[in-house]
Amino acid sequence: MQKLISDRFEETRNDLMKEITYLSDDQFNRKPDLNSWSIAQVCHHLVLVESATIKAIAWGIKEDEKTPREPRKIDLILDRTRKIQAPKIVEPNIEPFTVQQIIDLLISLREKLVAFLSAIEDESILTKTAVKHPAFGELPLNQWIELIYLHEQRHIEQIKEIKTRLGKAPEYPPNN
């Protein structure tokens, strides 16, 4: 795995942990309004996306057809003015989580991701194979990997917005 990407993984994950570690479970599960996700739901979504990404990459590596695809402009994911509907498979649970539950899931899954990526013998396969991404279409596997930390950065900004809104908005009970 490229050092640049692994450094960005670590830096981004550290930023996420700073945003959530000291929240109470109530703050973590409180929604800023009835139609928004709680911070816990945003984090659960991140867990689901990272897990789905591992599966997509593993599937792509096993595919016989290896045809390089042109890289896409994936940094568009950082533009929070562009709404992206989460596919059903990565929609978070409505049940509340503790902060520690999510932290444990994030740590465990990241360890699994790093082990999975480290086990790829020929990294060139990551540029030679593409798998359909729900937001970007056919996407080379190396860009699926890059999207992990970019997607997390997007949602760190969402978490900051939720925290701001919770400080100013009426409080809604968790998951109503």
Image (cartoon, rainbow, N blue to C red):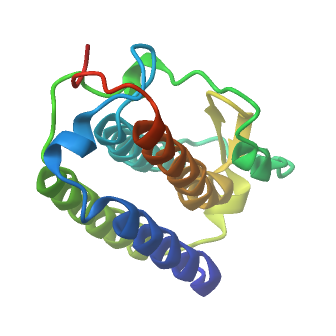
Which of the 4 image quadrants contains residue 88?
Answer: top left
Q: Nearer the viewer, residue 47 or 97?
A: 97
Residue 68 lies, with reference to residue 31, above or below; the image says below
Whether residue 9 is visible to the viewer of this picture, yes or no, is yes
Which of the 4 image quadrants contains residue 2?
Answer: bottom right
Q: What's the residue at 62%, 27% (across, down)?
A: 134
Residue 128 locus on image (x, y percent):
72, 56
Residue 21 locus on image (x, y percent):
26, 65
Q: What's the residue at 50%, 46% (across, down)?
A: 164
Residue 44 locus on image (x, y percent):
31, 40
Whether residue 120 is visible to the viewer of this picture, yes or no, is no
Residue 6 lies, with reference to residue 92, above or below; the image says below
Instruction: Using residue 16 as the reference point, say whether residue 5 is left or right of it.
Output: right
Q: What's the residue at 16%, 60% (across, down)?
A: 104
Q: Nearer the viewer, residue 45 or 158?
A: 158
As drawn, the residue found furthest toward the bottom would be 3
Identify the image quadrant of the C terminus: top left
Residue 143 lies, with reference to residue 38, above or below; the image says below
